[in-house]
Amino acid sequence: LRAEDKVTVHFVNRDGEKITVQGNTGDSLLDVVIDKNLDFDGFGACEGTLACSTCHLIFEKDVYKQLGPITDEEMDMLDLAYGLTDTSRLGCQICLSKSLDGMTVKVPESVSDVRQSVDVGTTTS
Amino acid sequence: MNETKDCFWKRILKIYGNTRIVSVCSLGYLGTRSVASTAAHQPKVCIVGSGPAGFYTAQHLLKNHQSLQVDIYEKLPVPFGLVRFGVAPDHPEVKNVINTFTQTAHHERCSFYGNVTVGSDITVDLLKRAYHAVILSYGAEGNRSLGIPGEGLPGVYSAKDFVGWYNGLPENKSLEPDLSSETAVILGQGNVALDVARILLSPVELLKKTDITESSLEAIAASKIQRVLIVGRRGPLQVACTIKELREMIKLPGSKPQLDPADFEGLKDVIEDLPRPRKRLSELLLKAAMEKPVGKEAERQAAASRCWGFKFLRSPVEILAKANGARAVGIRLAVNRLEGSGDSARVTPTEGREDVNCGLIINSIGYQSLPIDPAVPFDYKQAVIPNTMGRVNQAPGLYCSGWVKRGPTGVIATTMNDSFDTARSVLQDLESGQLDTTSAKPGYVFVKAVLEQQGVSPVSFTGWEKIDAAEIMKGKEAGKPREKLLDVAEMLKLARA
C-alpha cells in the first residue's frame, strides 16, 4: 500500500493515554484495533457483526459530522453502550478515509468499574 | 480453521495484550513490561461455570497477572453456558464471543474441566483447599415460578426449559412441548420472551439454517401455532426487551404485529423526554402500533399468515385446565392498573379478569440463580450471592461474577464488564495480600484426587474440541453450522475417543 492510503488515528485509551497508529483506507476502526494489537479490554466482542456495543468509540464533534450515515441497527446497539455520548459510534461501522486523517477517538470507560491500580499487564506502548 | 498463523497471533494478542507473547512473536515495536509477582507462590484460582461470566473473568485475570493459574469447572462436558444454550439459534453473531473464549481456554495458564458438578462431585470447601480463590460464575439455572394454580399442567413450560429444548440442553431434550394449538401465550416481555416468540413464528426455511436442534426443528415445522401473545404486568413504556429484538419481531418474515392502538394512546408526548434507549424503543413500538403500514410493508403484512402481539397490564392468576384436568387450555389474567411512571412504575391488580384460550403457555418472567453449596452465602430474596464488587460477603477467598452476582439481566457486554470488575477485585486482593498466597495450593492435583474417588472423570478442552468437530461435521450434512449432541453419555464417549 502506498503512503497516501494510510490514515493516522490517535486513540485515547481508558487510562487517558494516547496511542497513535496508522490504518489503511477502507479498514474499519475495529480492524485497526485488531491489526495494531491495541489492548482495549473486551473490544469487538461480536467481531464486527452489529450484535454488541463493545467497540463503542467517542469522536470529536467535527469528525463525527463527517462520518457516514448511521443505520437503525447501529443505533440499536449504541443504545446499550456504556457511557453513550452525542458523538458515539461503533468502531466496526466506521471505515477509514483520507478525510479522517489525524482524528482522535476516545475509548469510553466502562461505568460499572471502580478503577483499580493493579492492571499490571496493561499495555502502554 | 482456515485462519492464517499471522492472523491467529493477532487475535491472541488482542485478547492477552502483548506482555507475554511478544517474545514469541518477536513483534519488536511492542514494548514488554516485566512484572514481579508479590506472591510467594503461584496464585491458583478456579472458576465455577464456563459461560460468559466465567470466561470473561478468566480472560481478565490471565491478561493482567503474569503467573496466576486459572482452572474453569463446568457441570456439562461442553463449555460456554448460555452462549451455547441460551443465545437464540438465529443470533449466530452473538456466538462469535466463543472465538475469544476458545483462545482463553488455550492459554497456557488456563485449564477447562467439564463434566464436574461443583456442590455434588466436589464441595466448595474442598475447592477452597485446592485454590487461593474460588470464583462462582455459574449463572442462573432456575426459572422464577408464577406461583399460580395450574402452573404444573401439561402445556405450561418455563422459558428456561423451552429455550433449553430448542438449543439442545441435555436435560431438556425430552421436553416435547405441545405445539398443537393455535395460540401461544408467553408471560414476560423481555428478550427471552421475544426469542421464544420468534422461534415459534419464524419460517422453518430460516430456522433450518441455524444450529437449532434437529428434533426441535421437526416439532416446530409441524407446529400449529399461528398467534403469539406476549403478556406483561406493566405498560408499553415498561417492556423489558431491547430494541434489536423488538425490531426483529416487527420485521419477522411471515408474521405481522397485532398491537392495539388504544394501548398506546397519549404516549407520544410522554416518550419525548425519556432517556435515549427507552425513547427509541418506545418510538419503534408506537410506530408499529399506530401507523398504518404502506407499500411493501403493507403487502408483506397482508400476506403474513401468523401474528404476534403484546398484551399489557395483565398478570396471570390461574391456568385454565381442560374439563378432565389433563392439560392447559387457557389462562386467566388479572387486569392491572399502573401507578407511577417510567421504569419504577408499579401495578395493582383490579377486579377485572380476562381469559385467553391458548394451548401453549410459556413462563418467561425470569431466570433465577440457585444456591449450589451450603458453604456459599446466598440471598434467597434477591436470588444472588451477596457480594461487594464481586467479593462474597463474609467469605474470604470466595468471589462471584455474572448473573449469580447481580441477577439475570443484561446483555453479554454487561456480563463482560461485571466479570472484569470481579477479576479486578481478585487482582487487587492478591496485590494487597488480602488473598494470602504465602502458602502453596495444590490446585487441580488435589481436585483430581477427589474426583477420582468420586468416580468422576473430567472432560478437557481438547475433549470438547472433539465434540465440537463432530457437531460441526454433522451439521455440515444438514447445511447448518452444527448439529448439537443432546446426550451427555454420547458427548463423553466422543470426548474420550
Image (cartoon, rainbow, N blue to C red):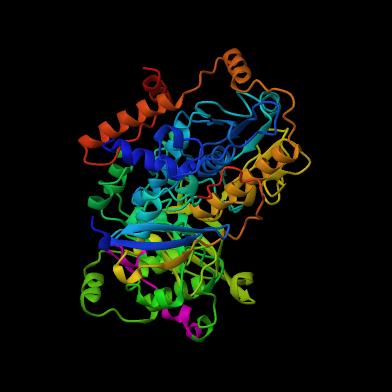
> Residue B289 vs residue B109: left or right?
left
Q: Quadrant of the N terminus of chain B?
A: top left
Residue A100 quadrant:
bottom left
Up-down relation of residue A49 to residue B172 (above or below): below
Does residue B369 appear to the left or right of B179 in the view shown?
right
Q: Position of residue B28 (x, y in %)?
A: 42, 41
User: Looking at this view, is A29 or B447 the one in front?
Assistant: A29
Relative vertical location of residue B360 with respect to residue B444 in this rendering, above or below? below
Q: Position of residue B106 (x, y in %)?
A: 44, 31
Tell me the magenta residue range.
Answer: B248-268
* Number of numbered discs on residues: 0
* Quarter of the figure with residue B484: top left
Task: Spot the residue most to the right.
Answer: B394
Query: What is the quadrant of the C terminus of chain B in the image?
Result: top left
Asked whether the viewer can see residue B199, the reply is: yes
Q: Is residue B321 visible?
A: no
Whole-percent x, y for residue B471 in the image = 31, 32
